[in-house]
């Protein structure tokens, strides 16, 4: 994929290690998560009850929903615990210099 498919959404200084940051890109509510393995992006809404995940806790590679405690893997959106069973949408992330970029999925 070329860099033209990616959009700058934040600067690296806005997302210290072991933290998350809510951003919006073209109507998508996205949660950036900076974990030991890198920076990842998933949709900010829990797939179970649509709670906003930026209000939850980031623990290692998991984001915990603030409403019912469902855990998701921020690396790929996988639902790890009930009551959630559906994965979160995940987005490709690039870091270029001090910029964090996200690629939105193509819509037909």
Image (cartoon, helix red, strand yellow):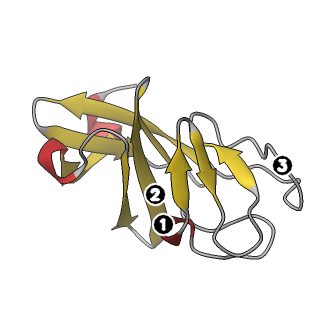
| Residue of label 2 | 31
**Chain-order first, disc 1 or disc 2:** 2
Mark 2 and mark 3 lie on one chain; the one further toward the N terminus is: 2
Return the mark for residue 54: 1
Asked whether the viewer can see residue 108, the reply is no
- Examine the rendering and report whether any part of residue 73 can be seen: yes
Q: Is residue 76 left or right of residue 102?
A: right
Q: Residues within 10 Å of mark 1 (few under 14, many from 20)?
A: many
Q: Residue 105 vs residue 98: left or right?
A: right
- State the mark number for residue 2: none
The residue under the point 89% across, 53% down is: 85
Tell which tag, 1 or 2, sits nearer the viewer: 1
Q: Quadrant of residue 47?
A: bottom right
Q: Nearer the viewer, residue 30 or 33?
A: 33
Circle 3 — which element?
loop
**Image quarter in which the C terminus is found:** bottom right
Residue 80 x %, y %: 79, 43
Task: Determine the residue positioned at 70% across, 76% down.
Answer: 67
What residue would you read off at disc 3? Answer: 81
The residue nearer to you, when weighing 6 against 23, is 23
Quadrant housing the N terminus: top left
Percent position (x, y) of residue 104? 46, 49
């Amino acid at each position: 994929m070329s860099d033209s498919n990616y959009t700058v959404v934040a600067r690296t200084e806005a997302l210290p290690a072991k933290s998350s940051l809510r951003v919006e890109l073209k109507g998508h509510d996205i949660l950036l998560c900076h974990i030991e393995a890198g920076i990842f992006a998933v949709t900010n809404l829990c797939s179970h009850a649509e709670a906003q995940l930026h209000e939850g806790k980031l623990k290692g590679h998991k984001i915990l929903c603030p409403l019912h405690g469902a855990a998701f893997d921020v690396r790929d959106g996988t639902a790890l615990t009930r009551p959630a069973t559906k994965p979160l949408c995940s987005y490709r992330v690039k870091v270029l210099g001090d910029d964090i970029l996200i690629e939105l999925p193509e819509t037909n």
